[in-house]
Amino acid sequence: MAHSNLLPEPAPIPDANAVPVVEFSHVSIGFDGKQVLRDISFTARQGETRILLGPASCGKSVLLKLANGLMRPDSGKIYVFGEEVSALPQSDLFRLREKIGMVFQESALFDSLTVRENVAYRLREAHAEDATVEARVQEVLRFVELEHTLDKFPSQLSGGMRRRVAIARAIITHPELLLYDSPTGGLDPITSATIIDLIVKQRDVYGGTSLLVTHRLQDAYMLATHTFNRETNQMQRIPNSGLDFSTTFLVLNNTSVVFDGTLQELQHAEDPFLKEFLS
């Protein structure tokens, strides 16, 4: 049978004139007298995937928690969907988070709930009808290829499967913004590739905006150089050494942003820290 090598339409380059989905403006935060982030400014626009890189303990996970309103900055402003998250009362934060999905480190599933119950949790909290909940649970578990695990508990799953369930839980409400905190952390290379495959699939099928923290350069490069092939249901390298221009990089070091741009720009950066970090 002829292989037509169908690819999805390339993701559009985010509109520089549109209101950013996420905007940090001169944000700083510290704990116990130690500065963690200092004067951080960046944007994430509709349809853009921002990959957050940097040494361990440089504030990448803190940045995600700030974006989700789980922490408040010491100074500066944070806007999500045009609303100032850093000043919203708790009741408004709950409303805003209905449009945000978060994949925590180590999955953060509820051990006492089945896969079905874990994935359905956010819809149950929103008092969705039973038929709607069941249909959406089935849909997202098919998307992550775990529909056979509905009645299993997290302890019965591998680390990679738990991470895929966490992604299913995060996307069940069709969020406009996804926050991934080290989604491949602690996984072996083969399982990590499976998770990145799934994230690329989510990006290219559903769109939306993402902030993704990773410690693995290989994962970051795969996100920028691969697309999802709907015919084979697999991730595939973009032909002719192409790049996904909706996927860009933010590198943190010593509390500050030291790079903001494309993979091509990152690979050609002359900064000594970046050269060493990428080597």
Image (cartoon, helix red, strand yellow):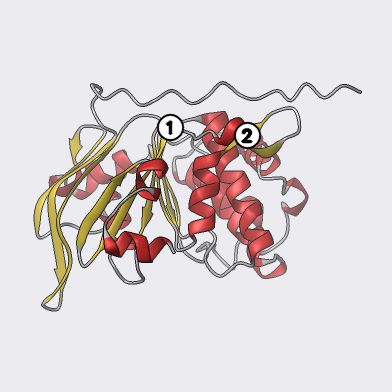
Location of the N terminus (image quadrant):
top right
Of 159 and 14, the residue lying toward us: 14
Identify the residue position indicated by label 2 in the image: 228
Of 114 and 72, the residue lying toward us: 72
Q: Which circle, 2 or 1, is nearer the viewer?
A: 1
Residue 136 figure quarter: top right
First of labels 2, 1 by sequence position = 2
Judged left or right of residue 72, residue 198 is: right
Residue in the picture at 32% in, 71% down: 57
Of 138 and 204, the residue lying toward us: 204
Expressed as whole percent of the image width and height from the top left, the position of residue 216 reads 49, 61
Location of the C terminus (image quadrant):
bottom left
Element carrying mark 2: strand
Q: Kindly identify the amino acid type of the residue bearing the numbered disc 2.
A: Phe
- The disc at residue 81 is none
Expressed as whole percent of the image width and height from the top left, the position of residue 259 reads 27, 51
Q: Are marks 2 and 1 in contact (CB under 8 Å)?
A: no
Classify 73 as above or below 240: below
Residue 232 visible in the shown view: yes
Classify 235 as above or below 191: above
Judged left or right of residue 96, residue 215 is: right
Element carrying mark 1: loop
Of 139 and 63, the residue lying toward us: 63
Residue 198 figure quarter: top right
- The disc at residue 245 is 1
